Amino acid sequence: DIAMTQTPLSLSVTPGQPASISCKSSQSLLDSDGKTYLYWYLQRPGQAPQLLMYEVSKRFSGVSERFSGSGSGTDFTLKISRVEAEDVGVYYCMQAIELPLTFGGGTRVDIK
Amino acid sequence: QVQLVQSGAEVKKPGSSVKVSCKTSGGTFSTQTITWVRQAPGQGPEWMGRIVPILGTVNFAQKFQGRGTITADRSTSTAYMELNNLRSDDTAVYYCANAFGVAAPRNWGQGTLVIVSS
């Protein structure tokens, strides 16, 4: 199975400041079709996870432009340009290049 | 936008079975892939398996093979996940989701809490 490693484990951010989360996979997520199957999810307290980004850098419907994704191969980053109170929760990266899908351990983001 | 509504919470005895339903609306059920993810208390999500209703194809993560079943009723746009021989470490919230591509969760159900306790 592909291992997904996220850092840091937690972040405490002042509103309006940026935040960055790193995700590394144990093997390349670049498929032969040219797509890279790396996804980002946010799980707000008491809620189901929700999709933020797909294929590294594509924002899902309704996701704020404050969120951006980058990276290639095995190294990826999710950035929040200006953190707001509604961004609090646990962020997970996930690979979907092969089954079983595997998730990172999560990064908890809270507000200072 | 596809919506997924799951069945209610369950309390089960060790060794028993649970069947969670996931009714979809707002999309074409047959052509979607439905994927199942669970989350134990305080843990991250764990992918369990998926079904492609139009093909009848089912894939399970190895740890659930032999104990899990995923089915789909195209007439009611409902998917089901059944887990047998429950253990206490199966206590979790079980989610269904429609999928991007192979199995990546897109829109999620609200989750179904399953508690396994004697």
Image: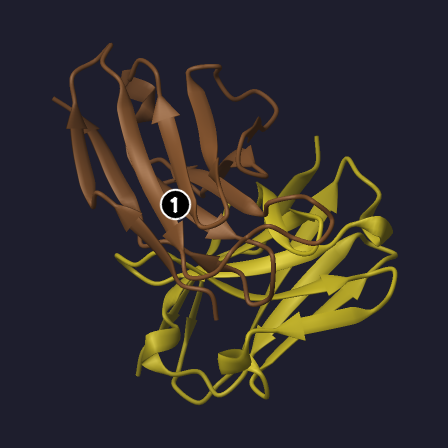
Residue nearer the viewer, A59 or B51: A59
Q: Residue furthest top?
A: A16
Chain B shown in which color?
yellow
Question: x%, y% of residue A101?
Answer: 53, 61
- Residue B95, horizontal then vertical, whole percent: 52, 55
Q: Quadrant of the C terminus of chain B?
A: bottom left
Q: Is residue A93 above or below residue B67?
A: above
Q: Going by the image, does A25 lie left or right of B72?
A: left
Quick one: which residue is furthest to the left in this view? Answer: A112
Number of other residues with Cα within 10 Å of mark 1, as a class: few under 14, some 14 to 19, many 20 or more: many
Frontmost residue, A19 versus B36:
A19
Q: Position of residue B79 (x, y in %)?
A: 71, 60
Quadrant of the rendered structure where residue B19 is? Answer: bottom right
Residue B63 appears in the picture as rendered: yes
Task: Label 1, secondary structure: give it.
Answer: strand
Which colour style is shown? by chain
- Is residue A66 shown above or below A44? above
- Residue pictured at 36% horizontal, 46% vertical: A23
Q: Is residue B112 above or below residue A82?
A: below
Residue positioned 51% across, 43% down in the render: A39
User: Percent position (x, y) of residue A104?
Assistant: 37, 53
Chain A visual colour? brown
Give me the residue at 35% from left, 22% from top: A80
Which corner quadrant holds the N terminus of chain B?
A: top right
